[in-house]
Image (cartoon, helix red, strand yellow):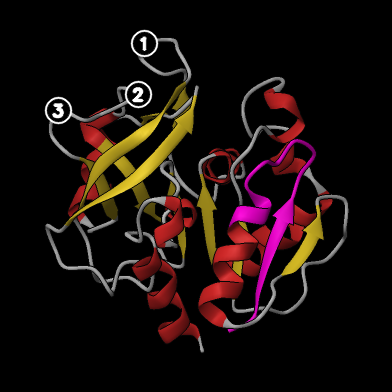
Amino acid sequence: MKSAVVVFPASNCDRDAAVALESITGRKPYMVWHDDREVPDVDLIVLPGGFAHGDYLRSGAMASLSRAMQDVIKKAQHGVTVLGICNGFQVLTEARLLPGALMRNAGLKFTCRPVKLEVTETQSVFTRKYDHGQQVVFPVANGEGNYYADDETLDRLEGEGRVVFRYAEGDNPNGSARNIAGILSEKRNVMGLMPHPERVCDPLLGGTDGRALFEGLLESLS
């Protein structure tokens, strides 16, 4: 499986994503600078966490207009698999590849801690290695992770099986609507996820619950 990680000014999880990808796929991902005009032909594009462009304007707003993102949008529309983690999720909503928006956390404070998640959809390349209802622990690190969409959009996401991860009851760290932590695009080839699976891919980092996500992608896209 060939992969690429798009790097924006103030990305801080690009290397975390690259290390996880190389460890699990056996191949180093391309590191694509945000001002590059094209992303190489790959099977998976990852938009990493961080604070692209310092989170000025709105988180992800400036990044969504970058040269590299224009190619990401085209490739996603043609079926390439795209994973946006934390800030990458924000970029995907700003680029309109995913519905809704990420707002300030309900407590108006930056939150950084492990959270319990429930896998609510396994019919996707991202979650095929998990069991439906399985609980996993991923860390969160965000100040604007509060997922919002209108009720019609939320009903559609749930009805179409596009909510893939929810915060476990009582462990919603940011106030996200209906405890939503991760969603799929209509074509199911794009996923945005606020917690960080790439940070729990090695026992030395305190957990391996994120490995199944990348292993499922490897099996599906190789």
Q: Residue 126 in magenta?
A: no
| Residue to which mark 3 is pinned | 170
Q: Residue furthest top?
A: 108
The reply, left or right, for residue 85 in relation to residue 152 is: right
The reply, left or right, for residue 5 in relation to residue 192 is: right
Frontmost residue, 18 versus 126: 18
| Residue to which mark 2 is pinned | 174
Examine the rendering and report whether any part of residue 212 can be seen.
yes
Residue visible at 35% across and 55% down in the picture: 207
Q: Quadrant of the N terminus?
A: bottom right
Is there a contact, CB below 8 Å, between mark 2 and mark 1? Answer: yes
Check disc 2 and give the amino acid type.
Asn
Residue visible at 29% across and 56% down in the picture: 162
Residue 104, compared with residue 97, is above or below; it is above
Residue visible at 21% across and 30% down in the picture: 171
Q: Residue 12 in magenta?
A: yes
Query: Which segment is the magenta one?
Result: 1-16
Q: Secondary structure at mark 1?
A: loop
Residue 53, compared with residue 199, is above or below; it is above
Residue visible at 61% across and 73% down in the picture: 22
| Residue to which mark 1 is pinned | 107
Query: N-terminal of the two: label 2 or label 1?
Result: 1
Q: Secondary structure at mark 3?
A: loop
Check disc 1 and give the amino acid type.
Gly
